[in-house]
Structure formats: C-alpha cells, structure tokens
C-alpha cells in the first residue's frame, strides 16, 4: 500500500495492488496520515472505529466518501471487517423488526410510528448511509414534530431515536450518537401540569357518566384505584379477587406502563358498583369493559381520551373541544388545545383526596403505583388493611346505586360469586 501523486491533476492516489484509488486531495501530509491510519487499522494497531470516526469528521464530502470506500476495502480484504453502514431506512427498519420481538406490543407500535415519521421527515436523505445523520437532522425532526403535537410528545420520539442510535453504536455501525445533547424545547416549561378535580367536579363527571355506557364503571375504577385509563380499560374478571370477607377483596393486575404488580383493596363505592351494576360473565378472561378494551387493542387509546373529554365538556369542566390547531390545520394529527384536565386528572384527584385526609405518602404511593427510591431502599411493605383504610377516606359520590333487578342467566355478579387469582395479568 503506497501513496503516489498525479502531477497533472495534483491529486494523491492510493496504490492497492493492481489498482489505484484517488484520495480526492492534493495535500500530501493529509493523504499520508489517512493512509497511515488505514494501515494501522488493517494490522490491528488501532481500533478501526477510531479511523472511521476520523474519516467521518473530514469536512470535504468527496474526500470523506473516498476515505470511507478505501477503509472499507482494506479492512474487508485484510480482516474481514465491514465498516459500511446501510442506509438510514434499511437500518432503522431492521431495528424496529428486532424490537418488535422483545418489547411490548404497544411499545413496538410507538417505535414503528416514530420511525415512519422520521423517515418521512428525512425524505430522500433516508437513502443515505446511517452515519450521515447529524444532530441538526435530529433537531429539525423535533422542531417539525413540535409543531403538530405537544413538545413532550415530540421529545418522546427523540428518546426513541436515541435508543436506536445507541444500538447502532453498539453494533459498530456508527461512532457517534447524533441524538445526544438534544433537549426538550422550552415550550414544555410553559405548559400547565394536570390539575386534580375537586369533589364537586367529580360529582358532575359521575352524573354525566351514568348515561355514557361503560364510562361510569371506568370512572369509578379510576377514582377508587388511581390507575391509568388503559389499565382500567383492560381489566378482566380474573383481576377481581372476591374471595372471603368483602374487606379482603382486591383488584390485582400488572400495569402496562411500568410492569408493576398492583393489589388494591376494593373500596366500598366500587364494591357497590361491581355487585349492583356491573354486568358479569362466566368467562373469567372476559373484559369488564369489552368495548373500551377493544379500542385499546386496536391502538386507539386516544379515542377513549377524546370520549372522556366530551364527558368533561358535558359536565361543564372544559369549554371547548379542539380537533385542529387554527395555526397548524393538520387534521387529526394536529396539536390539540392545551388543557389541564384529562382522565389522568382522576389519578391526581385520588392522590390529593387521600393526602388531604392525612394518609401517609408511602401508602398513597403504594396504592397509586408511584415508585419512590426512598421507600424502595428500606423495602417498605404496605399492608392490605392500611391501604383499605386509606381508600375508605375517599368520598362517596352521588346517591347509592338503585337496587339491581333480579339477575337472569348469571349475568349479574353477587357476593357469593368468587374470582380467584389464577391467570391474573
């Protein structure tokens, strides 16, 4: 391997056996240093990734491309190492396919949606080698997404890309992660956080839910367990453990977001609803709220959120429902009008009501499912009795349910009906 200069073109060439490769530069020192690095890498004297990183920093695109080709040829011939990264589109789609086999279905769908939008943003640039993606590309994508969705949602997409590029680095496809250093836009700091409902608002919501199908049950489960909408919508009958004394009954399941096992006592108002109003099924794997569960199974959790927002409007808690941003009319993908109220506000309400009743923060955290490093470090165990006492401090809304009609065909639950813990999720 040697370097020679063409006197007429004033360009240096690398002699590789029977062929010459132009280095695209007329600077002798630069050409010799480049070839020296390639030779050292070919002999294992320095990591080939160091050379790849140096070549990627060459400002002249033509010189950089030729340096990459030469390094790839030498390393492949001498060490059998491939340094050529595939296109952005090919590499990231393969990553999504791998992730779909190891992450939850909802997470895989989130990754897939992010990748589709990222590739659409790149356009023809998605055909380029992966290492050509720069921090400017990432920030441009974030800025574009922030125009049609919340800034925190846009940043969540950046975090997904960060996972991808980290994986690419581990696999030796790139030497730097272009997402590092990209931060949330300042818009997030201006957004109002979710606000809890007060008792009067909760009563108004319950009143509107009475004629809204499954929403009365979903609302009561949300208030008296403090859990997220998707988790409640996917509860099954085997998640209700109704053996023994009523004081021992629990809702037991694993959260979708944090994969945490929850065992929450069934509060009195919720127990009354289950016994008197909730239609049962002989199939313990049946959903408590089948229509809502079907919507989440189709990846339409947002549909449930929009339905609840309409209930809030009917209750007079929010005034408008905005499907389009006037300044950015992108249809259903447009950024919605900001609101401090959503179904998640019920979770905040449960926390506030228990804390205002003087319930220990550790017990509240255990019921809601918030992790606390301080609590975890001492392995605090919250008893069923303590959690039951905490939930009994929650207010009962409205009037007691009307007496149920006599059940026919085993369609109504009753106190003697038990639901064991087998097959819980």
Image (tube, rainbow, N blue to C red):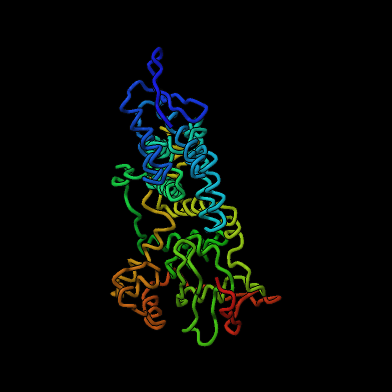
Most distant residue in the right direction: 409
The answer to whether residue 119 is seen in the rendering is yes
| Front residue of this view, candidates 129 and 114 | 129
**Residue 282 x/y as whole percent:** 67, 75
The answer to whether residue 333 is seen in the rendering is no
Is the residue 422 above or below the residue 82 in the image?
below
The answer to whether 106 appears left or right of 137 in the picture is right
| Front residue of this view, candidates 23 and 264 | 23
Residue at horizontal 56%, vertical 54%? 100
| Front residue of this view, candidates 367 and 210 | 367
Q: Quadrant of the N terminus?
A: top left
**Residue 288 x/y as whole percent:** 58, 67
| Front residue of this view, candidates 26 and 99 | 26
**Residue 416 x/y as whole percent:** 60, 85
Q: Quadrant of the C terminus?
A: bottom right
**Residue 308 x/y as whole percent:** 49, 54
Residue at horizontal 48%, vertical 25%? 20
């Amino acid at each position: 391997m040697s370097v020679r200069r063409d006197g007429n073109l004033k360009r240096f060439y690398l002699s590789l056996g029977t062929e010459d490769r132009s280095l695209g530069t007329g600077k002798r020192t630069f050409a010799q240093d480049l070839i020296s690095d390639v030779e050292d890498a070919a002999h294992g004297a320095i990591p080939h990734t160091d050379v790849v990183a140096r070549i990627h920093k060459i400002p002249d695109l033509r010189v950089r491309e030729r340096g990459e080709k030469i390094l790839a040829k030498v390393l492949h011939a001498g060490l059998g190492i491939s340094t050529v990264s595939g296109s952005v589109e090919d590499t990231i789609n393969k990553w999504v396919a791998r992730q779909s086999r190891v992450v939850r279905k909802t997470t895989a769908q989130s990754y897939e949606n992010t990748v589709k939008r990222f590739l659409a943003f790149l356009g023809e640039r998605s055909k380029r080698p992966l290492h050509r993606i720069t921090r400017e590309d990432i920030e441009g994508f974030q800025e574009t997404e922030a125009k049609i969705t919340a800034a925190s949602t846009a940043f969540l997409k950046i975090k997904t890309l960060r996972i991808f590029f980290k994986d690419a680095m581990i696999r030796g496809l790139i030497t730097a992660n272009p997402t590092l250093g990209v931060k949330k836009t300042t818009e997030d700091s201006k957004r109002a956080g979710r606000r809890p409902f007060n008792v009067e608002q909760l009563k108004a919501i319950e009143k509107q839910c009475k004629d809204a199908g499954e929403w009365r049950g979903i609302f009561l489960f949300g208030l008296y367990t403090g859990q997220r909408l998707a988790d409640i919508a996917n509860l099954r009958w085997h998640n209700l453990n109704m053996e023994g004394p009523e004081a021992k009954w629990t809702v037991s399941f694993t959260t979708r977001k944090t994969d945490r096992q929850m065992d929450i006592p069934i509060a009195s108002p919720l127990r009354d609803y289950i016994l008197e109003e909730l239609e049962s099924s002989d199939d313990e794997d049946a959903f408590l709220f089948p229509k809502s569960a079907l919507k989440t199974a189709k990846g339409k959790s947002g549909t449930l959120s929009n339905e609840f927002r309409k209930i809030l409007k009917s209750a007079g808690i929010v005034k408008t429902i905005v499907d389009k941003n006037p300044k950015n009319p992108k249809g259903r993908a447009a950024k919605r009008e900001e609101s401090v109220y959503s179904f998640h506000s019920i979770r905040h309400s449960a926390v506030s009501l228990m804390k205002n009743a003087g319930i220990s923060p550790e017990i509240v955290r255990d019921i809601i499912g918030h992790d606390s490093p301080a609590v975890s470090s001492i392995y605090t165990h919250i008893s069923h009795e303590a959690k039951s006492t905490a939930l009994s401090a929650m207010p009962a809304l409205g009037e007691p349910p009307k007496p149920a009609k006599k059940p026919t065909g085993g369609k109504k639950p009753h106190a003697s009906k038990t639901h064991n813990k087998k097959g819980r999720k």
